[in-house]
Image (cartoon, helix red, strand yellow):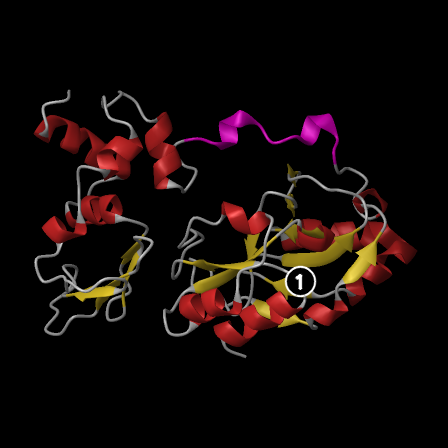
Amino acid sequence: MNTLDTALMWRDAGIAVIPILAHSKRPAIMWRKYQDMLPTRDELKFWFGATGYGIAVITGHRGLVIVDWDDMRKCSRWLSSLNGAALPVLSTYHVETSRGYHFYFFCDEECRMWKGDGVDVKASGGYCLCPPSIHPSGHHYQNIGNISDIERIDSLLSLLPEYGRIEWEPQIATLSPHSGDPYRDAMIDTPPSGLSIEEAKRLVSFEELLPSLSRNRGTRSALCPFHNDSTPSLVVYPDGHWFCYACGAHGRDALDMFAMKRKFSISEAIRELARTFSIL
């Protein structure tokens, strides 16, 4: 099943999905509004028709919660500890990842995001990559069962007694400069650049970065600056994200492209813009 068919299937099940930049875990769109609404079928066709994007489900819809084990040994010990209570876990739809499993449930009790010892709970306010996405490591996510197999449970505590214990709460330290989100990293980076991220974005434009950019409204194309491109293979979408169909380069806006062309991090790019415009 291709990505578009998968997206439509999730929508028919009442679950919102969003596009993910190729070979990453970064959303290709501003996705927060889809925590409370389903994307339209036209949006799904636009995102997944021929873009090469991965796909992620928004957790929280209909009580959807995903128990994400990233250590196979710890997952096995968890399953062994359940004894007779393991039936909903073994029968529910789950996904094989590069290191473990994602177990999907509809939970009657409201759940929150939580991180434990080798396990994450993806709940309201989160998202999770799903097949046929490709993990940044190159591993293909694999279905085990169908989404119609997702089990409904009363409470996550019945399967994960440690869930919610204070000593297992995620710490602020996890949002470090190694968070994997360059914009979050830029916000906590030091020394300060004198520019906010939004101010930096206003100082760069695709028109300056891509001299060959087509002038039409909506989706535009250009020669890709990241490989020897003889025909326009880079597409800039109306919401500002961009993708090269030849080399796979991608980003969420012009600031991303500015940084990549100079081999800068986002923080370094912002400092460079501040110096260029005499803000520092």
Visible residue check, residue 139:
no
Give percent across and percent down for residue 10: 61, 67
Give percent across and percent down for residue 48: 44, 69
Q: Is residue 64 above or below residue 6?
A: above
Q: Quadrant of the C terminus?
A: top left
* Residue 167 on the magenta segment: yes
At horizontal 65% and vertical 30% (from top left) the residue drawn is 169
Q: At numbered mark 1, what does the secondary structure look like: helix, strand or loop?
A: loop
Q: Which residue is mark 1?
A: 14
At horizontal 16% and vertical 27% (from top left) the residue drawn is 274
At horizontal 52% and vertical 69% (from top left) the residue drawn is 41
Visible residue check, residue 113:
yes
Q: Is residue 205 left or right of 164 when viewed as pictured? A: left
Q: Is residue 265 above or below residue 84?
A: above
Mark 1: amino acid: Gly
Give percent across and percent down for residue 19: 45, 60
Residue nearer the viewer, 22 or 199: 199
Magenta-drawn segment: 164-176
Q: Is residue 103 left or right of 2 when viewed as pictured? A: right
Residue nearer the viewer, 242 or 164: 242
How crowded is the residue under tag 1: few (<14 C-alpha within 10 Å), some, or many (20+)?
Answer: few
Residue nearer the viewer, 266 or 49: 49
* Residue 186 on the magenta segment: no
Q: Quadrant of the N terminus?
A: bottom right
